[in-house]
Amino acid sequence: MKSRTAARFPARRVGTGHPRAGAAKPVGLTCAGITKDGPRGDGEIHMGTMHRFKGLEYQRLAIIGVRKGAIPRPYIERYRRSDPQRYEHEQRKARSLLFVAATRVRDVLAVSWHGTPSQILDPVITY
């Protein structure tokens, strides 16, 4: 695969029509969406969810929006008391997905959030 830059989001649906894709236009960049069949379009920046990037590799990668309430998904809180094993399993899945997403890069990785960062990042963030 050609060396490209990619942006990944915890969201379920992201594509070239997503509002974040519009941020690239003023500086002359184009975006290609990542579908289940791979990149769609010839954009310099590939955009998609973390699930869509499995098996792909990029020179530069930004994982955007790794905040509390986005990863892990808020629905897992219902299991915290009712099914602690399921809660831990869902936590591990979210951590694993973020790990897999972060290991798809060769040279430069940026992880960002707004508001409160995901608790998954706690071991690696220095305040």
Image: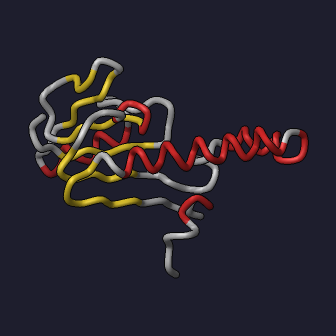
- Where's residue 96, x and y in %? 52, 45
Residue 56 occupies quadrant: top left
**Position in image of residue 64 (x %, y %):** 41, 52
Side of 121 relative to 79 (left or right): left
Q: Residue at horizontal 45%, vertical 50%?
A: 99
Q: Residue furthest bottom?
A: 127
What residue is at 36 percent from the left and 34 percent from the top? 54
Is residue 93 depicted above or below 120 in this figure? above
Which residue: 17% across, 50% down? Answer: 59
Q: Is residue 26 left or right of residue 125?
A: left
| Rendered residue at 82%/47% (across/down) | 80
Query: Does residue 49 lie above or below 35 as drawn?
Result: below
**Where in the figure is residue 124, as x and y percent of width and height?**
49, 70
Residue 13 vs residue 126, the one in the foreground: 126
| Quadrant where the N terminus is found in the figure | top left
Judging depth in this view, the residue of 79 and 103 nearest the camera is 103
| Rendered view: 4 above or below 115 | above
Identity of the residue furthest to the right in this view = 82
75 versus 111 height, above or below: above
Looking at the image, how many numbered discs can be counted on the residues? 0
Scheme of image coloration: secondary structure
Taking the view exactly as shown, the residue that stands out farthest to the top is: 37
Q: Quadrant of residue 112?
A: bottom left
Task: Give coordinates of residue 78: x percent, y percent.
Answer: 82, 40
